[in-house]
Image (spheres, grey):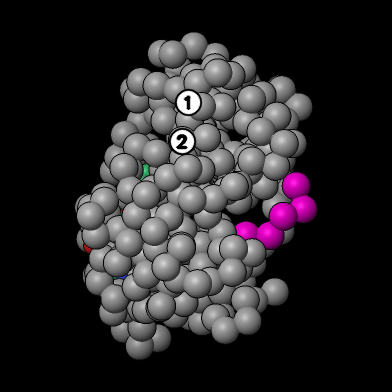
Amino acid sequence: MTTASHNVPSLQLNDGRMIPQLGFGVFKVDPDETERIVLDAFEAGYRHIDTAAIYGNEKGVGRAIAASGIAREELYITTKLWNDRRGETEARAALGESLEKLGLDHVDLYLIHWPTPANGSPVETWETLGAMRDEGLTRSIGVSNFDERYLPEILETGFRPAIDQIELHPQFQQRATTALAAEQDIKIEAWGPLGQGKVDYTSGTIGAIAERLGVSWAQVVLAWHLSAGRIVFPKSNRRARMVENLAAASVQLSADDIAAIDALDQGAAGRVSADPAEVA
Ligand code: NAD
C-alpha cells in the first residue's frame, strides 16, 4: 500500500495499525526552526514525523502540524518517554505533556526511549504504556534501544511492542536484536540510518552501487533499509536532501547489491552512538 501522492509504502504492525515506512526525524533540529523545517518536510511529501520529549522540539512539530492543514489521519506522529519519567504516574504525566505540546489528542506511536538498566525494571512503565494505548492516547506502543539484552523482559509482560527503534546502519546491523524482533513480529525502526554523518558511506561498496545506479549514496543506504522491511526517518535540515531521501522509496537494489551491503556489518565495533547499557 502506498500513500496517495507519494511513493512511500506502509507496513502493517503486529497490532494491526499501518505505518509509513519512510519518515522524517527531528533529532537535533533547533526548537526555533522546527516549525519551518517540519513544514518543509510536509511540503516535500513526508507524512511521518519522529520526535521525542528530550529533543525539546515537540511544540515546533505541533505548530507545523497545525499550520500544515493536513488531516490528522494522514499523519503519523511518534514521540518518546524520556529516561527520568519512570513508573505509572510519571509516564502518564509525560505523555500528557507531550500531547499538549504537539496539540494532539493522541500520538500514533509512543516509545520508551532507552532501557536505562541502572534505573531498575522498565515493566511498570511498559505496562502503563499498554494501558495508555488501550485508552486511545497512543495508537501503538514500542521501545527504543532495547536490544537483545533488554527486549526479553518486555516480552514477558504480555504487551508486545509493535516497534523497536535501534541504531542500525550498514556497519552496525544488530543481527541478534533484529532476529529476535523478527521472531516476535516486531518491526525495526533504524535510527541513525545514514550513520549520523559519522561514517563515510560515500565510497567503497555503497559508492560503487550509487554510481552504477545513478543515485546518491544516501539513497542506496535508505533503499537497503527499506528492502529489509525496516522503517527509517533520516534527518536533514536541507530541502534538497529531504526530497532526495524521500525519493529513495523508488530506488530498487538487486539481491547482489543488498548482499554486498549486508556484508559491511562490523558487529559491535560498528556502533557510532551510545551503548544502551551505559545510558541512565
Ligand atoms: P541520520 O543517520 O539520519 O543522519 C543525519 C545526518 O545525515 C544529518 O546531519 C545530515 O547532515 C546527513 N544527511 C541526511 N541526508 C543526507 C543526504 N541525503 N546526503 C548526505 N548527508 C545526509 O541520523 P539521525 O538524525 O541521528 O537519525 C534519524 C532520526 O532517528 C533522528 O532524527 C531521530 O528522529 C531518530 N533517532 C532516535 C534515537 C533514539 O535513541 N531512539 C537516537 C538518534 C536518532
Q: Does the magenta stretch include residue 81?
A: no
Q: Which residue is drawn at 39% across and 39% down?
A: 53
Q: Which residue is drawn at 66% across and 33% down?
A: 132
Q: Is residue 17 magenta?
A: yes
Task: Give the residue type that dot 1 points to.
Answer: Pro
Instruction: Identify the residue shown where x is 34% and y is 73%.
Output: 40
User: Would you say 236 lies left or right of 263 here?
Assistant: left
Q: Residue at x 50, y 21 (%)?
A: 90
Query: Does 206 appear above or below 99?
Result: below
Q: Is residue 8 above or below residue 199?
A: below
Say the numbered circle drawn on residue 208: none
- The residue beneath circle 2 is 97
Q: Position of residue 51 (x, y in %)?
A: 42, 49
Type of residue at label 2?
Answer: Glu
From the image, tell me which residue sits under label 1.
115
Ligand 1: which quarter?
Answer: bottom left
Q: In which quarter of the image is the C terminus?
A: top left
Circle 1 sits in a helix, a strand or a loop, which is it? loop
Magenta-colored span:
15-19
Front in this rendered view, residue 90 or 176: 90
